[in-house]
Amino acid sequence: MLKGRSILEPMDMTTAELEEIFDLADAIIDDPEKYVHACDGKLLATLFYEPSTRTRFSFEAAMLRLGGKVIGFSEPNSSSVAKGESIADTIRTIACYADIAVMRHPKEGAPRIAANATDMPVINAGDGGHQHPTQTLTDLLTIRRRKGGFNNLTVGLCGDLKFGRTVHSLIKALSRYEGIKFVMISPEELRIPEYVRKGVLDANSIPYREVKKMQDVMSELDVLYMTRVQRERFFNEDDYIRLKDRYILDLDKLVSAKEDMMILHPLPRVNEIAVEVDSDSRALYFEQAKNGMFVRMSLIMKLLGIEVQ
């Protein structure tokens, strides 16, 4: 049972629990009207210490479409954080008003501090370059709806693999399925960090390759997960400028790709996917964004222990 639990990383959920979340998300997609009053009287608190468009709007839309209400902040300077209030005190106070909270924070581990300070369910909406479990749920639901499952897929991850928390979370989540292979496409400076390489891939004997050109591996991929080079994670502007346009997916690069390959992206997009790709049937990143709302609706219901007959 997921009721009352906090979700801080993908491994907080078993594969069976993931399937429960996805099954409910599918049911919501098929009949959204059935769930419009599921969260009547419930309140979601959104605590965003870092800018967000999709994730914050997605959570807010999810709760509102379930009939609940939303309070919160999208800029920490508009809260008592600006006065020096601790994360623990903030979440304890919010728990006096809300039923469930979602937190994004630039510091790794901040949502865990919040979860440890309250019995209210806390959802990690991204902590630094660490984890982003609900983006992973979004990614997995999108893959499952197109591929029917996760076994025996070759997944290409392209761009910023060092700082990309969505990539780190997705690797951890997919590591539990059979026959998974990863192809890491990045410059030397943005390769996956050692804690992912050793702690997840090597520890689970998962096959992976590291390459510098996406064209060299395009024909092998079942899923291509593009990421942007994140300016906000760089300490040196020159390094960002040098690396930001290293990988740009256009139609020419898709010539050798499988007809049913999936192109995913957590968004926002900058230059890494040419607009001309949007009309390709394999481009699923906006469908992916919509799926994010549905899977968050499902997760909110599960954590609050709400069932609709």
Image (cartoon, rainbow, N blue to C red):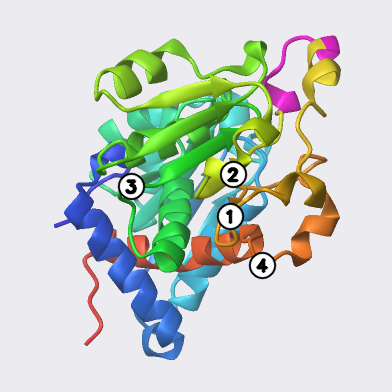
Q: Quadrant of the C terminus?
A: bottom left
Front position in the image: 139 or 109: 139
Picture quadrant of residue 236: top right
Q: Which residue is mark 1?
A: 258
Q: State the residue at coordinates (26%, 44%).
A: 177
Which residue reaches farthest left? 1
Question: Could you tell me if the residues under marks 1 and 2 are in contact, i.e. CB atoms within 8 Å?
Answer: yes
Q: Residue at x 23, y 48 (%)?
A: 5
Residue 174 shows in this picture: yes
Say whether disc 2 or disc 3 marks the residue closer to the N-terminus: 3
Q: Which residue is mark 4?
A: 281
As shown in the figure, which amino acid type bears the numbered disc 3? Answer: Asn
Label 4 or label 1, whichever comes before in sequence order: 1
What residue sits right under mark 2 in the picture? 219
Q: Tell me which amino acid carries mark 2.
A: Ser
Foreground disc of the pair 4, 1: 1
Q: Which residue is mark 3?
A: 152
The magenta segment is 230-238
Asked if the residue at tag 4 contacts the one at tag 2, i.e. Cβ–Cβ closer than 8 Å, the answer is no
Residue 256 is left or right of residue 202, and the answer is right
Q: Earlier along the polypeptide chain: callout 2 or callout 4?
A: 2
Q: Residue at x 35, y 79 (%)?
A: 27
Rendered view: 301 above or below 163: below
Residue nearest the viewer, comparing 205 with 117: 205
- First in residue order: circle 1 vs circle 2: 2
Q: SS class of the residue under badge 3?
A: loop
Q: What is the CA distance from the residue labelled 1 to the residue labelled 2?
A: 6 Å
What secondary structure is marked by label 4?
Answer: loop
Q: Nearer the viewer, mark 1 or mark 3?
A: 1
Helix, strand or loop under label 2: helix
